[in-house]
């Protein structure tokens, strides 16, 4: 699952994207979704940016596809 992020992390945070795994660059982040904290990444796709949300976090936060969520993100300290 993914949540669209309404900004470009590179421009907003002045941090270049880093390799996350083979073939994918993005930004490692600490995030909170519906009051559930987790570690994830923001990745670009089709000129937009998405926060990746694993199934366990989605279940814990009580979110489903198309639902409204409250999200906060900040770059993870390296």
Image: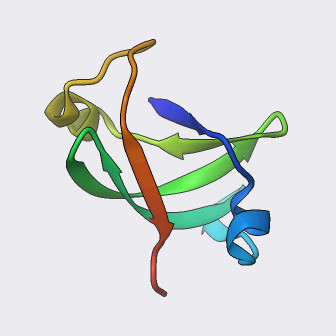
Q: Quadrant of the N terminus?
A: top left
State the residue at coordinates (68%, 72%).
13
Residue 27 lies, in percent from the top left, at 60, 65
Residue extending farthest left? 60
Does residue 16 sit above or below 37 in this rendering? Answer: below
Please indicate whether residue 63 sits to the left or right of residue 60 in the image.
right
Residue 11 lies, in percent from the top left, at 79, 66
Please indicate whether residue 36 sits to the left or right of residue 68 in the image.
left
State the residue at coordinates (21%, 46%).
35
Q: Using the rendered view, name the quadrant where residue 40 is placed.
A: bottom left
Residue 57 at least partly seen: yes
Residue 21 at least partly seen: no
Most foreground residue, 10 or 41 = 10
Does residue 14 sit above or below 29 in this rendering? Answer: below
Does residue 68 sit above or below 31 in this rendering? Answer: above
Q: Using the rendered view, name the quadrant where residue 17 is placed.
A: bottom right
State the residue at coordinates (20%, 34%).
61
Please indicate whether residue 68 sits to the left or right of residue 15 in the image.
left
């Amino acid at each position: 699952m993914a949540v669209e992020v309404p900004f470009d992390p590179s421009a907003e945070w002045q941090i270049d994207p880093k390799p996350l795994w083979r073939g994918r660059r993005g930004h490692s982040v600490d995030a909170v979704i519906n009051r559930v904290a987790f570690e994830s990444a923001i990745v670009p796709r089709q000129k937009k940016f998405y926060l990746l949300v694993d199934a366990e976090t989605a279940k814990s936060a009580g979110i489903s596809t198309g639902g409204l969520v409250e999200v906060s993100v900040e770059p993870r300290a390296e």
